[in-house]
């Protein structure tokens, strides 16, 4: 009978479950949380803020229950999870789940999982052959943004009434302003290195990772030289962290395990420690990415960013961007070859003012709030009158 409760996958059951949901009374104090992976991102940061509030009952809907002290959990698609969802006064999600059966008496807090740089949803397909993401127009629906520009970008991506989008900042970014957990999570002493660099590329579909045009594990560069890179890291006393999508980690593990001063951040280890990338990001000195919107968050730290984009024209053609021109919105050197990458990385390490004016300008445009109170703002927005 487990298939009966797979709301997300079986659209035929959705109308029935929604009718049932309309009839079931709601517990205004019950909040169900959801994220991908479990216990991560904006949902986890907001949960950490709310869990100390005595009159709220917080329950996580998870893929796999974990040994997390004092956290109520229900396994996704189970009867118990369905009951919790139907009884909840509020649903909080980073990926729009549980929205299909939600009714307007339930608050729905769509925290999403990052501000848009790449085209997505309606802006990627112009609405053609696309199932709309979660989007409601009632007063109990909340989508958050980090600035007016991002609010308008999200409205376009979600085909959303902009009045349902609220500028609060992202709860996960609160962690950037507090002591990080880098040494605890990665079992490494950051003081042993002069510089800590993180490579965090966007996730690409498998046919776009290694189709003869691009290999992300080579830091996106055709001319990548592993031996030369290892020497560069050692000579400059650099710890180089890499974080790929879970589906890319197996190949990355094979590639990077033979390189000195390189450490792969594995998703399973983060989950085991009930952490995410934002528990580490505050301890990073330089970010390297391509088209991942993680750099919008990193701008809050005013630290150097390098964009490894040898396939920029192809990516713009195949995927596209919400924010153009890309060159304006990316405040850091754009490198297309491995030799350029090493040269620009050296400049970032040795000159803290490199691209600083550009970073601060873009930060002002994409991050209206530059503090550790985003969770508080979301809480006041949603539950302020309770």
Image (cartoon, grey):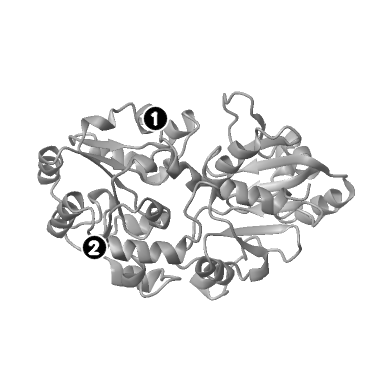
Q: In this view, does 317 lie above or below 199?
A: below
Per the image, the residue denoted by label 2 is 333
Q: Is residue 107 above or below residue 45?
A: below
Provide residue 373's location: percent of width, then percent of height.
55, 47
Picture residue at 73% right of the left edge, 48% below the top: 383
Mark 1 lies on a secondary structure that is helix
The foreground one among 23 and 344 is 344
Mark 2 lies on a secondary structure that is loop
Distance from the alpha carbon under mark 2 to that under mark 1: 30 Å
Q: Is residue 80 above or below residue 338?
A: above
Binning the other alpha carbons within 10 Å of mark 2 as few (below 14), some (14 to 19) or many (20 upward) gives many
Provide residue 328's location: percent of width, then percent of height.
33, 72
**Quadrant the N terminus occupies:** top right
Q: Residue 185 carries which label?
A: 1
Quadrant housing residue 266: top left
Of mark 2 and mark 1, the one earlier in the sequence is 1
The foreground one among 306 and 37 is 306
The foreground one among 128 and 168 is 168
> Is 21 on the left or on the right of 67, as rendered?
right
> Is 148 on the left or on the right of 32, as rendered?
left
Quadrant housing residue 169: bottom right
Quadrant housing residue 34: top right
> Is 261 on the left or on the right of 30, as rendered?
left
Binning the other alpha carbons within 10 Å of mark 1 as few (below 14), some (14 to 19) or many (20 upward) gives some
Q: Can residue 303 be seen in this view?
A: yes
Disc 2 + disc 1, Cβ < 8 Å = no
Q: Is residue 117 visible?
A: no
Provide residue 109's location: percent of width, then percent of height.
66, 52
Provide residue 145's location: percent of width, then percent of height.
56, 60
> Is 204 on the left or on the right of 238, as rendered?
right
């Amino acid at each position: 009978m487990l298939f009966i409760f797979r709301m997300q996958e079986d659209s035929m059951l959705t109308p029935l479950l929604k009718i049932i949901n309309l009839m079931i009374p709601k517990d205004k104090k019950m909040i169900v949380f959801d994220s991908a992976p479990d216990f991560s991102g904006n949902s986890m940061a907001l949960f950490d803020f709310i869990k100390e509030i005595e009159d709220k009952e917080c329950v996580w809907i998870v893929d796999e229950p974990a040994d997390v002290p004092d956290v109520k959990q229900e396994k996704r698609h189970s009867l118990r999870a369905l009951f919790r969802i139907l009884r909840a006064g509020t649903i909080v999600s980073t990926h729009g789940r549980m929205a299909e059966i939600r009714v307007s008496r339930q608050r729905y807090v769509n925290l999403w999982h990052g501000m848009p740089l790449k085209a997505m949803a309606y802006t990627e397909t112009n609405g053609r052959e696309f199932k709309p993401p979660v989007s409601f127009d009632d007063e109990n629906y909340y989508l958050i943004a980090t600035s007016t520009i991002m609010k308008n970008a999200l409205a376009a991506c979600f085909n959303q009434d902009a009045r349902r989008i609220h500028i609060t900042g992202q709860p996960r970014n609160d962690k950037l302003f507090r002591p990080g957990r880098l040494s605890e999570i990665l079992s490494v002493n950051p003081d042993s290195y002069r510089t800590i660099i993180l490579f965090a590329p966007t996730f690409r579909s498998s046919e776009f990772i290694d189709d003869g045009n691009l290999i992300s594990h080579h830091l996106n560069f055709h001319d990548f030289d592993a031996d030369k890179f290892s020497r560069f890291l050692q000579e400059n006393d650099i710890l180089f962290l890499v974080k790929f999508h879970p589906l890319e980690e197996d190949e990355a593990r094979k590639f990077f395990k033979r390189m000195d001063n390189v450490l792969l951040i594995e998703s399973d280890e983060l989950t085991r420690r009930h952490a995410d990338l934002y528990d580490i990001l505050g301890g990073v000195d330089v970010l390297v990415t391509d088209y991942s919107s993680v750099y919008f968050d990193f701008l809050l730290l005013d630290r150097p960013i390098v964009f490894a984009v040898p396939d920029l024209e192809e990516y713009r053609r195949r995927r596209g961007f919400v924010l153009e021109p890309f060159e304006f919105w990316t405040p850091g050197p754009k490198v297309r070859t491995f030799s350029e990458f090493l040269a620009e990385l050296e400049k970032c390490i040795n000159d803290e003012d490199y691209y600083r004016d550009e970073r601060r300008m873009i930060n002002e445009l994409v991050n209206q709030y530059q503090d550790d109170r985003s969770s508080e703002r979301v809480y006041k927005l949603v539950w302020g009158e309770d």
